[in-house]
Image: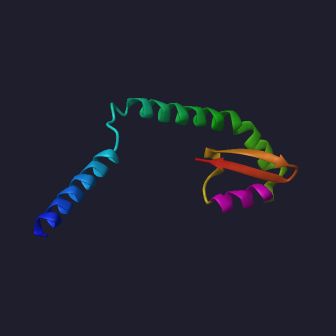
Amino acid sequence: MGAAIKQIAIFAAVVIAIAAWAMRAPPRATDAPSTLSTQALRADYARQVRDNAPLRVQLQKKYPDVYRDLASQTRRDLGGCVVTEMMPGILRANCQ
């Protein structure tokens, strides 16, 4: 009976080892592709913010109270956000 328990314990250990090996994380070649895509996303967002500057100024002049409320809701300077007018008097800020 002691030998049967040993065999079951060895079998369980082998099954656990195989399961752990199967669930391991795949090897990563490099982080270069993800870094490049992150940089591209940041550059694209920076371009969107620059292109949005005239519209931000226009919306700030047209809806000063709404713009101020939006700035207080986001708790940051809207100069680094893409601000759009969803409907007349309703502004949306995309801040990253």
Q: Main secondary structure of the magenta part?
A: helix
Outermost residue to the right: 88
For the point 59% across and 32% down, which residue is it? 44
Residue 12 rendering spot, x and y as whole percentages: 24, 59
Outermost residue to the bottom: 1
Residue 32 rendering spot, x and y as whole percentages: 38, 30
For the point 58% across and 47% down, which residue is it? 96
Res. 52 image quadrant: top right
Inspect the magenta stretch and tell me whether residue 72 lies in it. Answer: yes
Outermost residue to the front: 1
For the point 60% across and 56% down, which residue is it? 76
Res. 4 image quadrant: bottom left
Inspect the magenta stretch and tell me whether residue 28 lies in it. Answer: no
Res. 13 image quadrant: bottom left
Question: What's drawn in magenta, residue-wise?
Answer: 66-74
Residue 43 rendering spot, x and y as whole percentages: 54, 32
Q: Is residue 1 left or right of residue 84?
A: left
The residue lying toward the viewer, choosing from 3 and 20, is: 3
Count of numbered tags: 0
